[in-house]
Amino acid sequence: MAALRVLELYSGIGGMHQALKESCTPAEVVAAVDVNTLANEVYKHNFPSTPLWAKTIEGITLKEFDRLSVDMILMSPPCQPFTRTGLQGDVSDPRTKSFLYILDILPRLQKLPKYLLLENVKGFESSSARKELLQTLQTCGFQYQEFLLSPTCLGIPNSRLRYFLIAKHHQEPFSFQAPGQILTRFPDQDLEHLVENKVADKVGEVSSSSSSEEKNLDPNIDPDCSGEILPKGAFLFKLETVEEMERKLGQDNDSSIQMLKDFLEEENEEMSHFFLPPKSLLRYAFLLDIVNPSCRRSTCFTKGYGHYVEGTGSVLQTAVDVQLESVFKHIEELPAEEKLMKLATLKLRYFTPREIANLHGFPPEFGFPDKLTIKQCYRLLGNSLNVHLVAKLISILLG
């Protein structure tokens, strides 16, 4: 097939571009657009030959869009207006303005793109912005399918549930197309595992057949957990409930998921920079999601990882011969100094930026400019996407 002309909007560090390469699609990214200076530095570092437009999307005129004459648009609009922990400003949030501008431009293009792919957070599927997106696609004659997918469905030990939409213009419907439904597995996976969540057209809400299904759509909870029962008499340490412990045990026993050790860097002296400081250990020990190299799970890494501790991502226990139970049992009764000594035996550290990039599917040759700080790398990776998921969706989209 002839090389597709691709426009990458909200290009960030280049996750969509990397996915396009991984999909082995004959394509040329004719323009990448983003206003984030640091993200653009990383993009240029990895894709130096791609035209990078450091401007707002609203600053691109209809003439400029027409001049590009693209076959495919890849985009990952700002997610903050739709996150369930945020203000959920939706279309009234100023950060949605550029996305609404795209929806206004799309029907007026001289040549409509053949393909579209959009990524956003869980929560977008119940937004007014999504409703406007679907109305625009229908007006323009696109066939589309929506998904809620986590990297775990590809055997990657990281929960990062995201909304995806793929669309094609004036072509036959997808063979697996399920109108009004959001698929939570790839169409070529076991159909028995497809959870087809009915979407209410009026409010765009995903309804679940049970409260447990809804809970399993949390971005920090793997939707694939098998829910094995703990052996009787299991000791509950930290502040975790029986339900949480059962979920984690089920995930770690799921052999369809790779172990974290496959994504880790070799331990060396430089790793000392990533160990949790004593202050963080004492303050947040009971709230940490602690994993070890043989675990088959990790929680979603956010842009605050390495700076904020609670709820930003898992931490790695490098002293694999130490039992968590033995450290946390009765620890709250100890004075601070003894408590710290026990916690230090676990040798807890943050995942490195390279390790998070590995879990996100970025290849070894993908790098960061030397001038970027570790904190900046974490922030950029937290705003990025899973390359393997998008690559598979591109392949499905092109059939």
Image: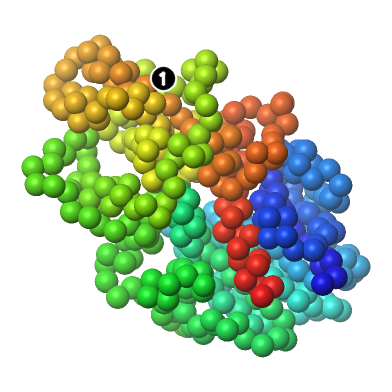
Q: Is residue 397 left or right of residue 277?
A: right
Q: Image quarter for residue 203? A: bottom left
Q: Quadrant of the C terminus?
A: bottom right
Q: How many marks?
A: 1
Q: Position of residue 163 (x, y in %)?
A: 52, 64
Q: Quadrant of the N terminus?
A: bottom right
Colour scheme: rainbow
Q: Is residue 355 left or right of residue 285?
A: right
Residue found at x 74% / y 66%: 73
Q: Is residue 19 visible?
A: yes
Disc 1 marks which amino acid? Pro
Picture layout, residue 100 above or below residue 201: above
Residue found at x 74% / y 50%: 34
Residue found at x 25% / y 57%: 227
Residue furthest out toward the left: 233
Picture layout, residue 286 above or below residue 107: above
Residue found at x 47% / y 79%: 181
Residue furthest out toward the top: 337
Residue furthest out toward the front: 255
Picture layout, residue 243 above or below residue 344: below
**Residue highlighted by disc 1:** 277
Q: Position of residue 133 (x, y in %)?
A: 62, 74
Q: Image quarter for residue 279? A: top left
Q: Image quarter for residue 205? A: bottom left
Q: Position of residue 209 (x, y in %)?
A: 30, 75
Q: Is residue 86 left or right of residue 215?
A: right
